[in-house]
Amino acid sequence: MKNISRILIANRGEIAVRIIKTCKRLGITSVLAVSDADKESLAAQMADRSVCVGSSAARDSYLKVDSLVAAALGTKADAIHPGYGFLSETPELAEMCEKVDLTFIGPSANCLRQMGNKLLSREIAEKAGVQTIPGSTKICNSAQASRAAEQIGLPVMLKAAAGGGGRGMTIVRDLEELNNVFDILSSEVKSAFGDGSLFIERYFPKAKHIEVQILADCFGNVIHLGERDCSIQRRYQKVIEEAPAYALSGELRTTICKAAVGIAESVAYDNCGTVEFIFDEETDNFYFLEMNTRIQVEHPVSEQITGIDIIQEQIESAALKPLSISQDNVRIKGHAIECRINAELSDGSFKPCPGRIQLWNPPTGPGIRIDSHCFTGYSVPPFYDSLLAKLIVTADDRFEAVKQMQICLDNFHVSGVDTTIPFLKNILHRPDYIQGKVNSRWLEDVVLKSKGSSL
């Protein structure tokens, strides 16, 4: 067992605040890595100590492996928690931690490499007996892409092997379009991820995005905390998440969760992670999509319906402790919904709106959880993702959760910066959403194309 009494948190915003809260509860000293822009942040105020790792741009601070490792060693930290985004799925950070005897709070570098590459992870899923989306191997040029698309059948999704966070993907509906976008996308993902490899998968126009929360330890124990529905998306980025996934039958729910556990077991996965699937409503078939080898933005909905602190399980697994709970003892209770609130215009342009928050008054009460780093007077910087808060409600069933979320959004008051609260209110009051008649294209194809989307 490893001693973890001091953790360097290599992240910012609401996830840094979230990790600090668990550290405080466990009696672990928290050291926060901050950029120049985040020196006065709420996370910096809450942490036991903060250390500046660079200037405001992420490439000069949160994305510098050497600076973060040096900060951890310099503050005598035992471990680094990467949060999500930034370097959270970077094998180089995990390897560097191992070299200098720091504990990386996440899966092994080997797991990061295997599951971080979409082509390799497809092969792993297939070997584990899980159906993958019909697709190609690595494609090197537009001629190969055209041949693959004809075999798979249009429309298709052109994807980056090393992509993530909704980037490096585009829907292609005809061969001419495919030829036009292939070189452009390859160049873009080469610049963004250091790997320009592309491949093609069949595109399902009426699909739901279902994901399964996994917990694992170094003793071979792998369990799931149920599944989430993350179908409300814009540009492949999630906007609203729910748990459990309301569209699945009991038998299908069991099968998809078992498949997720099987994939994690096949690579000796050893921390928290999320296995993502596409569920085709037209055929009731599900297909492996990818695995996220980190804590997810939407992890609170799984925590709310199970009562399990996923950050704590991450820390304890990294400390070589066995999971604190077995699969038989996981109990799913109620329904949870999470809305991501961003500093963006709600007029359909979603233009980021940095600035100073003059009023921050979120709703409170039973069944309401706010994960946020914001407060009245906080200056939202222009350098990072625009996420301000995650509003999570939990109720006995989905109908009550939707109703509670509608009330909470009405009572979430922010001034000084524009937010996506009006846009979220629009979604929550639409009959299609209330009745669960949505898929991963509904937000863009129905809401954003309708006159009522601009508020």
Image (cartoon, rainbow, N blue to C red):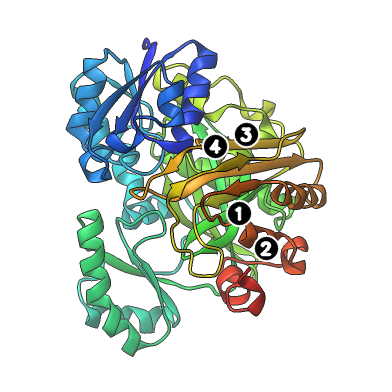
Q: Are marks 1 and 3 in contact (CB under 8 Å)?
A: no
Say if 369 sits above or below 324 in the image.
Answer: below
Say if 455 sits above or below 226 in the image.
Answer: below
Q: Residue at x 30, y 40 (%)?
A: 87
Decide which of 33, 351 is in the foreground and name it.
351
Decide which of 345, 28 is in the foreground and name it.
345
Circle 2 sits on which residue?
427
Would residue 112 be visible to someone looking at this image? yes
Say if 101 sits above or below 53 in the image.
Answer: above
SS for dot 4: loop
Q: Is tag 1's residue or tag 2's residue first in the polypeptide sequence?
A: 1
Decide which of 90, 258 is in the foreground and name it.
90
Circle 3 sits on which residue?
303
Q: Are marks 3 and 2 in contact (CB under 8 Å)?
A: no
Task: Judge depth for marks 4 and 3 and give the one in front.
Answer: 4
Label 3: how many residues lie within 10 Å, few (<14), some (14-19) or many (20+)?
some
Q: Position of residue 118 (x, y in %)?
A: 35, 56
Among the 4 quarters of the image, the one containing residue 426? bottom right
Q: Is tag 2's residue or tag 4's residue first in the polypeptide sequence?
A: 4
Among the 4 quarters of the image, the one containing residue 111? top left
Q: Is tag 3's residue or tag 2's residue first in the polypeptide sequence?
A: 3
Q: Amino acid at mark 4?
A: Thr
Q: Are marks 1 and 2 in contact (CB under 8 Å)?
A: yes
Q: Residue at x 77, y 33 (%)?
A: 366
Label 1: how many residues lie within 10 Å, few (<14), some (14-19) or many (20+)?
many
Q: Which mark is residue 376?
A: 4
